[in-house]
Image: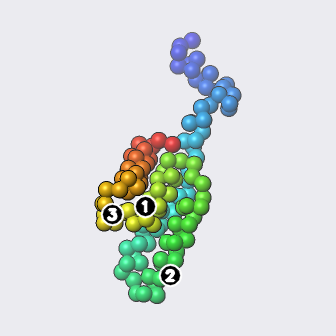
Amino acid sequence: MDRRTLLARATATAPAAAVPAVALAAAQTDPHVAWAAEADRLRPIMNAADPDTADALAAWIYELHELIVDTPAHTVAGVREQARVLCHVLGLDDGEHGDGTYEVAAARNMLATLERLAGEGVT
């Protein structure tokens, strides 16, 4: 019997407990990414809308942000979206807070790392 056949049989008969936790976590997804995409999609519409519509859209974006921060994340992509909301709320995504403080540097570095890891498919 060749090596491939042996590996295929071992995989097919391996108990679920033998499957690495990382492989199981990879199958999980977070709704955070979809919620963030919806908020990102609505933001330019809100900025171009009349005041009443803009207020309604701002309220919906706020609700989406609440969902993102209140729902535990299970993936790096979910945590990335939580960090994006934090940076947005703190005003660190507008490019005006380049004051060199440790807090600003830490937040921006954290977000950049999470974006890189999520882009690489790390779970």
Q: Is mark 1 on a helix, strand or loop?
A: helix
Q: Is residue 72 above or below residue 64?
A: above
Residue 40 image offset from top left, x and y in percent: 42, 66
Look at mark 3 in the image and give the residue it sits on.
Answer: 97
Marks 3 and 2, how far apart at CA = 28 Å
Q: Is residue 3 above or below residue 110?
A: above
Look at mark 1 in the image and give the residue it sits on.
Answer: 87
Q: Which amino acid does label 3 sit on?
A: His
Q: What element carries label 2?
A: helix
The answer to which of marks 3 and 1 sits earlier in the sequence is 1
Q: Which amino acid does label 2 sit on?
A: Ala
Disc 3 and disc 1 in contact, CB within 8 angstroms: no
Residue 1 image offset from top left, x and y in percent: 57, 12
Mark toward the viewer: 2 or 1:
1
Mark 3 neighbour density, 10 Å: few (under 14) some (14–19) many (20 or more):
few
Disc 3 and disc 2 in contact, CB within 8 angstroms: no
Marks 2 and 1, how far apart at CA = 23 Å
Residue 26 image offset from top left, x and y in percent: 54, 41
Mark 2 neighbour density, 10 Å: few (under 14) some (14–19) many (20 or more):
few
Look at mark 2 in the image and give the residue it sits on.
Answer: 56
